[in-house]
Amino acid sequence: MSKIIRTEKPSVLPWYGLAAVWLVFGLVFPLYKLGMLIVTAIVGAGVFFALKKLCPPRVIEQEVDFHTGVGDVDEMLAGMQKQLDTLHRLNEELPEPGLSAAMSRMEKAGRSIVEVVEKNPAKAKEARRFANYYLPDAVNVLNQYATLARQGVRGENAAEIKAKVDQNAASIATAFENQLDSLYASESMNLDADVEVLQNMMKGQGLQ
């Protein structure tokens, strides 16, 4: 999802040239005279525009993850993407089929939420709690579980944690999917309204 943002940075040489003209003329000629002041201004303007034409703006390219035009939304989406990348990595580490399937559902729903908000930044408010709490909390729990698995921890506590994660993973995935559905709720209502208007128009013209 990374994008290349291009911005133009104007050259400072025209301003340096303008300043140099006023400095040199001020040292050589009496600028307190109106005529000389006008001449200096004309020469300075000529140098300024000549250098501006000779020194075009420098194009700066910057790669960013998101560019919605809203800074805090871009930051939120970048954080979500980082969490989802971690979730994907953890899924590759944990071999249990049931848990892996639930984690795949979480990742799919999460990335779809990112896409929806990227296309419509106004929906960021609806996804803020998911981005700040639900997603990172889920990833944190799964990360702790993966750490126990890597370390080969056994015992009653480890077994209890594993059982809780296995039992709740599917529910967490469903919650992620419900969050995605809620973002589409307004679109669904608008579509229903559009369909109803179309049907009424068709009826009015005797097409139904």
Image (spheres, grey):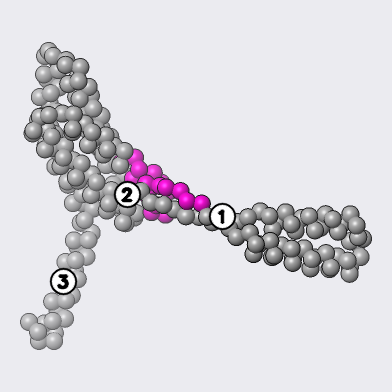
Label 2 to label 1: alpha-carbon separation = 25 Å
Which residue has dot 3 on it?
Answer: 195
> In the displayed image of the protein, which residue is found farthest to the top?
155
Indicate which label's residue lies in the foreground, 2 or 1: 1
Badge 3: residue crowd in 10 Å (few <14, some 14–19, many ≥20): few
Badge 2: residue crowd in 10 Å (few <14, some 14–19, many ≥20): few
Residue 165 point in image, percent of width and height:
14, 28
> Contact, CB < 8 Å: mark 2 with mark 3?
no
Is residue 126 visible to the viewer in this orientation of the structure?
Answer: no
Between 192 and 53, the residue placed more toward the observer is: 53
- Compared to 53, does 156 lie above or below? above
Label annotation for residue 1: 2
Indicate which label's residue lies in the foreground, 3 or 1: 1
Taking 141 as reference, is 97 left or right? left
- Compared to 38, does 137 lie above or below? above
Please tell me which residue is depicted at 41% across the width and 52% down the height of the picture. 4
Which residue has dot 1 on it?
Answer: 58
Badge 1: residue crowd in 10 Å (few <14, some 14–19, many ≥20): few
Q: Earlier in the sequence, mark 3 or mark 1?
A: 1
Q: Give the residue type at disc 3.
A: Val
